[in-house]
Image (spheres, rainbow, N blue to C red):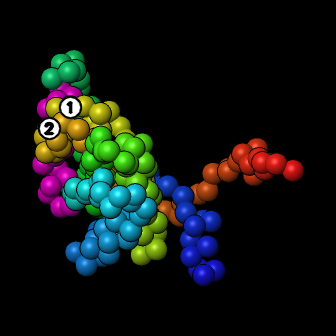
Amino acid sequence: MPEALDLLKTRRSVKPIEMTGPAPSPAEIDTLLTVASRVPDHGKLTPWRFIVFSGDARLQIGEKIAAIFSADNPQATADQVAFEKNRLARAPLVVAVVSRAAPHVKIPEWEQMMSAGAAAMNLVHAAYAQDFVASWLTEWYAYDRRVLDALGLQPHERITGFVHIGRPSKSPEDRPRPPLSDIVTHYGG
């Protein structure tokens, strides 16, 4: 298990703009999603699902994101609109993790949302385990109902995050992490 611990201890997010191809192959994507789906799921509800954006699909949804941005920002420059169009084209692969949390007689919605978060984190870890890098992002379009409708989300569904996956274009630098003494307490005595 030391290899798994090394991966977990050294994982860090890489900006999508610092990612390059090639994208994961279809078989690698299947592995990513298989690992992502192996998370705690109280009640076996599968309160999450995935939307995969690869190839031209990244720009197709980008057109819709840019149109919504333009409608809300008529003064936007061509560069700003182009930036929005390329939101999901910055990395070779993007996977939206969708929370399907809903009221349930036994399972609180909070637990269902946490399961979706665990699926997103497993997806990130699976990417690193396959020698890719990843970044889990939620930006304005993750909360815009018009974008969610364009993605086919149901009214109760929400975006947990867009996980951008690719290869690093440069060696990622780590950032300072909090010392355990700042974030850990021990109960009792």
Label 2: how many residues lie within 10 Å, few (<14), some (14-19) or many (20+)? Answer: few
Q: Nearer the viewer, residue 67 or 153?
A: 153
Q: In this figure, which residue is indicated by the disc labeled 1?
A: 145
The reply to whether dot 2 and dot 1 touch (C-beta < 8 Å) is yes
* Left or right of 3, for residue 187: right
Q: In this figure, which residue is indicated by the disc labeled 2?
A: 149
What residue is at 32 percent from the left and 61 percent from the top? 44
Q: Position of residue 118 (x, y in %)?
A: 44, 57
Q: Position of residue 84 (x, y in %)?
A: 25, 37
Quarter of the image with the N terminus in it = bottom right
Can residue 79 be seen in the rendering of this structure? Answer: no
User: Quadrant of residue 101 in the image?
Assistant: top left
User: Quadrant of residue 42 in the image?
Assistant: bottom left
Q: Amino acid at mark 1?
A: Arg
Q: Is residue 60 magenta?
A: yes
What residue is at 39 percent from the left and 44 percent from the top? 108
